[in-house]
Image (cartoon, grey):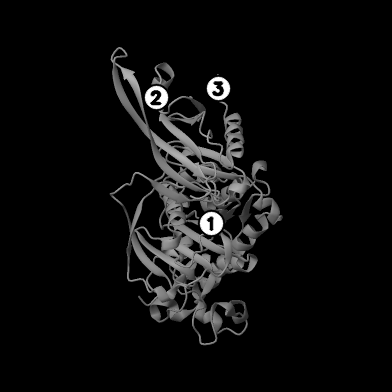
Amino acid sequence: MNSIFSTRNNRLSQSFGRLLILTALGASALPFLISSVLGGQNTADHPSKQAGKSPLKVFILAGQSNMEGQAVADLDGPDYNDGKGTLKFLLHDPAKAPRFQHLQDAQGRWTVRNDVWVRYQLEDGTVKAGPLTLGFTPYEGRHHFGPELQFGQVLGDHFTNQVLLIKTAWGGKSLYEDFRPPSSGGKVGPYYWKMLQDIHTALTNLKTDFPGYDGGGYELSGFVWYQGWNDGCDPKHAVPEYEQNLVNLIHDVRRDLGAPDLPVVIGELTGPWVVAPDEWALLRQAQAAAAAPPKFKGNVRFVETHDFVRPAADSPNPGHGHHEFGNAETYFLVGDALGKAIVELLPKDPDAAANAPILYRNAQYDFTFSLPASWRGYSVMIQEWEGTTFVADDKERATERGPTIVIRHPQWKASAPYQDIPILVFTRRQWDIHERKGIAIYAGGVEYEMEHNANYVFAIYSRFNLAEVDGWKEAQDIVERNQAANEPPL
């Protein structure tokens, strides 16, 4: 395949093993088991080694077609207004070329940035993954780009860490319906769930998508939202709800990713206007208002983009106002502004970020568990517990089974074990049986509740650290802190 990035198709595996091991760092590990079909990957396209240091700094770029990427790089002729407003056109403009020169090498080829990776799964399942360059869009080849191109340049310049951009953007999608977050009530938007699944799939397939990945873990570092056109097309329903729906989206994404303080940047709907009319002005106002609540001060930023609009006559797609006329300068400036805004929201004290607690979140069971920074790089195993109980007038035995989430310290070795934290997951029915009749899972000891939700109870075995291997007291303290933070109501 003659491309700097690899493409492949993902499909859900039909075979589920009894034991699933997932590496994690400060985020949940959804047990989506993915089977990959490589689409003619050229391994020479990927550097053999990771260029930046670990952990990876991960940023989510979410939205609809303008986040997908509609900027035209080098197409010309009558179908593209003779190439006006393309990146190639800008590079031939002496007044503007210096600003874009880093995107082209001395031989006139599009540059490739190896310390920034991009992953984008299209709606048809095709995955584009590789170092930052043009082409991470729904279109074939490297003739288009989106905000990620300059956004990645800004973040790559800011960090010495490897940066990973995960694009979760699909054209023609509204916040009102398609991305509708759970807290907004009604039917949750299917693309809200798809966004979360794509994020988790990306984070559990790092070595597959990026063979140079050194296994040093990752940190969820930011979320960017650039969307709005389809909501503006529904001024009766979607526009009046937009502000609250966007506030809910930020809340729910942070909750479901286990990142309560995740920096968020909202990109203003750009479109074809500097000054937007009617419902479009109201939509822009709603986007700005969503970033204004006091609880979002210092961690959510609204970025104006209307000044980046360029005339249709000076653009490659003059009839596509909803796509900013495909103007390369517009998309470049949007990405640049979004990148600079997220940098301003990042922690200023790297030691504080490094020492911050880690949240493990399992979205399948809606379970969150807090770990100290010393557990950064932990792994998770999903095992199975089995126990017996009495039925039929306490004369007949029955077997109950359920998952055990085993959280393992990064220092654990077979030759020198470090204390695991095994969390037993019961359905509410099973826990009711356990409380009334008991379920014999282990010899001696008891299982006590740590927390629960509407569907599950999460318990710990009282003798889980009886062997007193290294870290047994630390593990006990971690369990007790989590139990205290989630004290069940009387």
Q: According to the image, label 1 marks what residue? A: 217
Q: According to the image, label 3 marks what residue? A: 489
Which comes sooner in the sequence, label 2 or label 3?
A: 2
Q: Is residue 309 visible?
A: no
Residue farthest bottom in this picture: 107
> In this image, 325 relative to 356: left or right?
left
Q: Amino acid at mark 3?
A: Pro
- Asked if the residue under mark 3 is in contact with the one under mark 2, i.e. CB atoms within 8 Å, the reply is no
As helix, strand or loop, the secondary structure at mark 1 comes to: loop
Q: Quadrant of residue 434?
A: top left
Which comes sooner in the sequence, label 1 or label 2?
A: 1
Disc sitting over residue 474 in the figure: none
Residue 179 rendering spot, x and y as whole percentages: 44, 47
> Disc 1 vs disc 3: which is toward the camera?
1
> Disc 1 vs disc 2: which is toward the camera?
2
Q: CA distance from mark 1 to mark 3?
A: 36 Å
Q: Amino acid at mark 1?
A: Gly
Q: According to the image, label 2 marks what residue? A: 440
- Asked if the residue under mark 3 is in contact with the one under mark 1, i.e. CB atoms within 8 Å, the reply is no
Residue 152 rendering spot, x and y as whole percentages: 56, 66
> In this image, 227 relative to 354: left or right?
left
Mark 2 crowd level (few <14, some 14–19, many ≥20, 10 Å Cα): some
Which of the pair 91/219 is nearer the observer? 219
Mark 1 crowd level (few <14, some 14–19, many ≥20, 10 Å Cα): some
Q: Quadrant of residue 98?
A: bottom right
Q: How many marks?
A: 3
As helix, strand or loop, the secondary structure at mark 2 comes to: loop
- Asked if the residue under mark 2 is in contact with the one under mark 1, i.e. CB atoms within 8 Å, the reply is no
Which of the pair 417/182 is nearer the observer? 417
Q: CA distance from mark 1 to mark 2?
A: 38 Å
